[in-house]
Amino acid sequence: MVVSCDRLLIASLLANLLNNAQRHAATAVTVAVRAEDDTAVLPVFDDGAGIAPEHREIVFERFAPLPESRERNPKGTGLGLAICREIAHAHQGSLTVEDPPRQGTSLVLRMRLLP
Ligand SMILES: Nc1ncnc2c1ncn2[C@@H]1O[C@H](COP(=O)(O)OP(=O)(O)O)[C@@H](O)[C@H]1O
Ligand SMILES: [Mg+2]
């Protein structure tokens, strides 16, 4: 499975997702990669409190106004996921919060596979 990407930008995207997941996880973070047709799908799952369905888009806004963010991570910039999504889009990919397989949060990166 091969994608074309700027490795520094993708490293920063993944570091941000893993950092968030580690901070929110109750016990574990799970990362997987699979191919779906011409797309690489990379879910980062953590078994933490989760993101409420009504906040699934707000978390990608700069300085997302989520009260629990400030309590849990007073030093957080609130820019991480906004930048992650910009990096995904710059690669013609996507980054979304999706239904987790069980209690927790799934952030899913999708990128076009090279033929
Ligand atoms: N894995 C996660 N589990 C639960 N909430 C999350 C997770 N990742 C991000 N969030 C929520 O999305 C908000 C925005 O994330 P981010 O842009 O990385 O900002 P920051 O980490 O600086 O607070 C976080 O403050 C948090 O409320
Ligand atoms: Mg963050």
Image (spheres, rainbow, N blue to C red):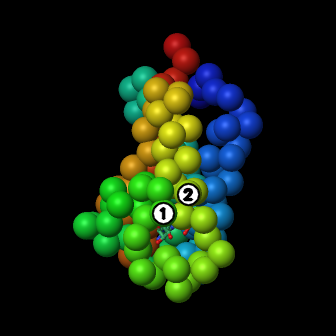
Real-space Cα distance between discs 1 and 2? 6 Å
**Quick check: 67 above or below 58?**
below
Name the side, left or right, on which 46 lies relative to 16: left
Q: Are marks 1 and 2 in contact (CB under 8 Å)?
A: yes
Extreme-right residue of the structure: 8
Residue 28 rendering spot, x and y as whole percentages:
59, 73
Confirm if mark 2 falls within 8 A of ligand 1.
yes
Extreme-left residue of the structure: 54
Residue 12 rendering spot, x and y as whole percentages:
68, 46
* Quadrant in the picture for residue 18: bottom right
Q: Amino acid at mark 1?
A: Phe
Viewer-proximal residue, 30 or 106?
106
Of label 1 and label 2, which has the lower sequence position?
1
Viewer-proximal residue, 41 or 69?
69
Residue 29 rendering spot, x and y as whole percentages:
59, 67
Q: Disc 2 marks which residue?
A: 79
* Quadrant in the picture for residue 61: bottom left
Residue 102 rendering spot, x and y as whole percentages:
38, 71
Is disc 1 surrounded by few (<14), some (14 to 19) or many (20+) residues within 10 Å? some
Quadrant occupied by the N terminus: top right
Residue 38 is marked as none
Q: Disc 1 marks which residue?
A: 63
Viewer-proximal residue, 66 or 110?
66
Q: Amino acid at mark 2?
A: Leu
